[in-house]
């Protein structure tokens, strides 16, 4: 079977599963936003392509996303994250986000989003906050670095960054104690992250699963193997009866049958499924 034939068969199978489903769970990793122009930081070369100023310093994604910088060198810590926040604020979610919403409306499905991304793109595309579980938090919320309390607050500030040095020209501080603040995201080797907001979202998701109607379809987009939390969640959901996983990924697309693997990017995959839905089910 050629790649083109495999894709056509996968689109047809995915369209059938979605058109027969009562519940949709959308799971997403970094690859879900690539078609919106967001980097996925895949490997050191991918990170340095997005942030070439770090390459001569030998700093990779894991180094830049280490929470120790906010205490040892806040301008460096905030430089990386402030740039990412601006990038996410200025990004327009790709068409695939709206295709997902069309399927939900077409089938009148209940649904939930689970993502390891901290970019807030699902909310920006119109998915309500109560229907999203951000397992690693969100850059659009802040907390105290110490932390002095369990408070989490929305981030509306803009932090200018010197793009030559990637150092922030302003340091955001905790409104309660005056210490340095930080994004409310789970970083690498992170012992001070306040997970209360994410935990509440997890509880919302757990309650949703207890009440959801079968059949269930999981549409997974851009979830790689380096940090496999999203992939494992998709597969756990898919192990239940009357549950089908549709895995869309240009590289790490393998999944055992009867689940469906679609070897392409998120937007191409969603558009391919949509074409089959329009042809056979509308």
Image (cartoon, rainbow, N blue to C red):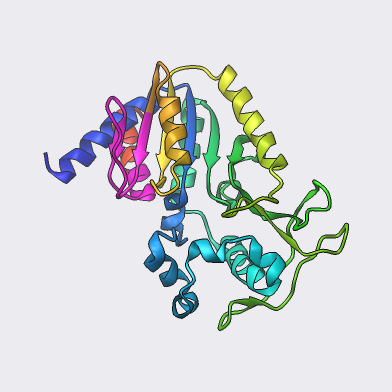
Give how far across and how far down residue 56 sits, in percent: 45, 80
Q: Which quarter of the figure has residue 82?
A: bottom right
How many labels, in total?
Answer: 0
Image position of 259 (left or right of 230): left
How far across and how far down the image is residue 143, in percent?
75, 54
- Residue 159 visible from this viewpoint: no
Image quarter (top left, top right, bottom left or bottom right) of the N terminus = top left
x, y percent for residue 220: 42, 39
- Asked if residue 163 lies left or right of residue 75, the reply is left
Q: Is residue 228 above or below residue 242?
A: below
Residue 200 location in percent, x, y?
Answer: 69, 35
Q: Is residue 193 magenta?
A: no
Q: Tell me if residue 215 can be seen.
A: yes
Direction right: furthest residue: 176
Q: Quadrant of the C terminus?
A: top left
Establish if 211 lies above or below 117.
above
Q: Residue at x 45, y 69 (%)?
A: 50
Q: Check the image and report above or below for 50 versus 113.
A: below
Q: Nearer the viewer, residue 236 or 133?
A: 236
Q: Residue at x 16, y 40 (%)?
A: 5
Residue at x 74%, y 75% (from the top left corner) = 170
The answer to whether residue 252 is magenta is yes
Q: Single out the residue that lies furthest toward the bottom.
A: 164
Q: Say which residue appears at 34% left-offset and 33% top-offset.
A: 277
Stretch of the chain drawn in magenta: 245-271
**112 relative to 144 in the view: left or right:** left
């Amino acid at each position: 079977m050629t790649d083109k034939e495999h894709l056509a068969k996968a689109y047809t199978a995915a369209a059938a599963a979605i058109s027969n489903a009562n519940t949709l769970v959308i799971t997403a990793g970094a690859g879900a936003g690539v078609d919106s122009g967001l980097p996925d930081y895949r490997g050191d070369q991918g990170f340095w392509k997005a942030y070439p100023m770090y390459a001569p310093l030998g700093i990779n994604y894991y180094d830049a996303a280490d929470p120790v910088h906010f205490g040892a060198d806040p301008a460096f810590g905030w430089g990386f994250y402030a740039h990412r926040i601006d990038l996410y604020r200025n990004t327009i979610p790709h068409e695939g986000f709206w295709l997902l919403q069309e399927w939900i409306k077409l089938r009148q499905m209940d649904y939930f989003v689970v993502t390891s991304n901290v970019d807030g793109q699902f909310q920006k595309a119109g998915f309500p906050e109560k229907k999203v579980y951000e397992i690693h938090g969100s850059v659009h919320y802040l907390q105290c670095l110490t932390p002095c309390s369990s408070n989490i607050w929305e981030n509306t500030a803009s932090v200018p960054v010197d793009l030559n040095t990637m150092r922030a020209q302003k340091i955001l501080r905790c409104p309660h104690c005056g210490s340095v603040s930080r994004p409310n995201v789970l970083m690498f080797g992170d012992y001070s992250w306040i997970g209360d907001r994410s935990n509440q979202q997890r509880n919302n998701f757990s309650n949703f699963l207890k009440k959801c109607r079968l059949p269930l379809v999981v549409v997974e987009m851009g979830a790689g193997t380096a940090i496999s939390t999203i992939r494992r969640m998709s597969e756990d959901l898919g192990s239940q009866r009357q549950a089908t996983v549709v895995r869309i990924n240009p590289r790490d697309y393998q999944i055992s049958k009867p689940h469906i693997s679609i070897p392409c990017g998120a937007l191409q995959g969603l558009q391919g499924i949509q074409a089959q839905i329009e042809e056979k089910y509308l």
